[in-house]
Amino acid sequence: MPLTGLPSLMLLFVGVLVGGAMAREPTMLARLANNLLQNYTVKVRPVRNWTSTTNVFLDFSIYAILKVDVKNQMVTTYLWYREYWLDRRLSWDPSQYEYVERLSLPISRMWSPDIVISELVEEDTSLEVPYVYVNSTGFITHLRPLRAVTTCILNIFSFPFDKQNCSLTFAAWTYTASEVTLVLRRTIEQLRKDRFAFVSGGEWELLDIVPYLWLQKKDGKLYSQFRFNMIIKRRPLFYVVNLLVPSLILMIVDLAGFLLPPECGERVSFKVTILLGYFVFLTTVVGILPATAQGTPLIGVYFVVCIALLVISLLETVLVLRVLYGHQENNTAGVWTTLLISLGFSPDNKDKSLTHTQGSENSTSNNDESGASSTLLEKAYQLDKILTFCYLLLISCVVVGFVLAWALP
């Protein structure tokens, strides 16, 4: 019988051998990576002449401001960080490698600049990207996210209308300026326009980014540094609604108390209630105020001044009552009795009986002094108008002063 199936079996056997050989042969990308890193030295800068300078191009975008810690004077920022440099040892001819123009290589297998942030106070906990992109000319691109917790001098005097200027200083930790020089990848205008990529849904708004390049001298050597100043502004609406507006409403209600007649005993109790209510308001909002040892914010002074104004308003009412009941015998007792009654405290029966007895004995004298009492009432009304006007003038000056203090930079 002819062996008709033998050629087919031989073709199948040859195909298996060729396929296995091709499977064991490395791909073009793997062969290129092996050729580039075979004799590569990680510890040496990528220059042919040791006197040459390695230029490292820096670029970043501020994605979000995660936290501003006023108490500890720290700012947490999330960045998209990018750095670029040229390494001729990692260049190749694309025509010899199937026109491969770009390749990703592990950064641990090549030299990389030791760029650090000088203001960093905590270790970066963001995702570490272990690979970089290398093109055929040896130009390397390193992209990675960066969570930077940096120190910043926060001035909260104008809280909640404050602006802060925090800096991020990128510097080469080991190499001098003659070895590694930092260069800004984009122009200043392009960097400032990039702030529109900022996620502005939080409390802070990014106003501007100002870069500065300078050489720092240390131990007789110059080091290249790049500083980026971030100008951020707090959105004050939350604090205006929860702090300033309730305080202003209480002050307006206190002003409404001057509409009550001077001889009304409820006027003093009304003023005292407003004052106590303001203290309760302060105890509920004290947790919203920033805590720092650097100084007192202007809003704290504002609350103290408001308390002082409420106390002055109460003292004005007491003074009007003093004038109103000054015609009585034992003026001091008359004033304090009126104050106690207005606050809701009634003298005991003995005091009432004594007062009634004294009033009966002096009824004739009081009738003779009815004209004087009417005159004192008129004087009390006049004094009340004068004090009310002075109080309104004082409040107006205080409001204008605080508005100017918050408005000025």
Image (cartoon, rainbow, N blue to C red):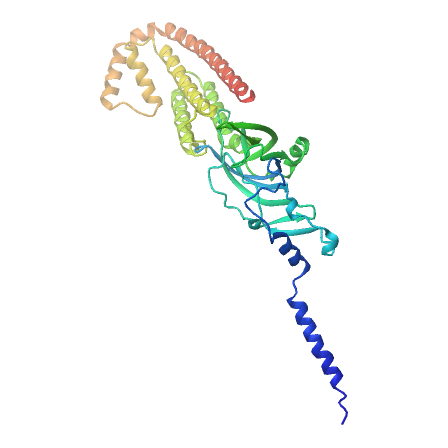
Nearer-the-camera pick, 136 or 143: 136
Can I make out residue 19 in this image? yes
**Position in image of residue 38 (x %, y %):** 60, 54
Q: Residue 214 occupies which quadrant of the picture?
A: top right
Q: Residue 281 occupies which quadrant of the picture?
A: top left
The image shows residue 138, relative to residue 186, as above or below, that is below
**Left or right: where 190 falls relative to 79:** right
Nearer-the-camera pick, 166 or 101: 101
**Position in image of residue 57 (x %, y %):** 63, 37
Can I make out residue 263 in this image? no
Work out which residue is located at the far bottom of the displayed protein and give it.
1
Residue drawn at (23%, 17%), measured in percent from left and top?
354
Residue drawn at (67%, 61%), measured in percent from left and top?
27
**Position in image of residue 393 (x %, y %):** 50, 13
Query: Could you tell me how many numbered marks the image carries?
Result: 0
Quarter placement of the C terminus: top right
Residue drawn at (51%, 25%), measured in percent from left and top?
158
**Left or right: where 337 falls relative to 67:** left
The image shows residue 25, relative to residue 55, as above or below, that is below
Nearer-the-camera pick, 363 or 265: 265
**Left or right: where 41 falls relative to 273:** right
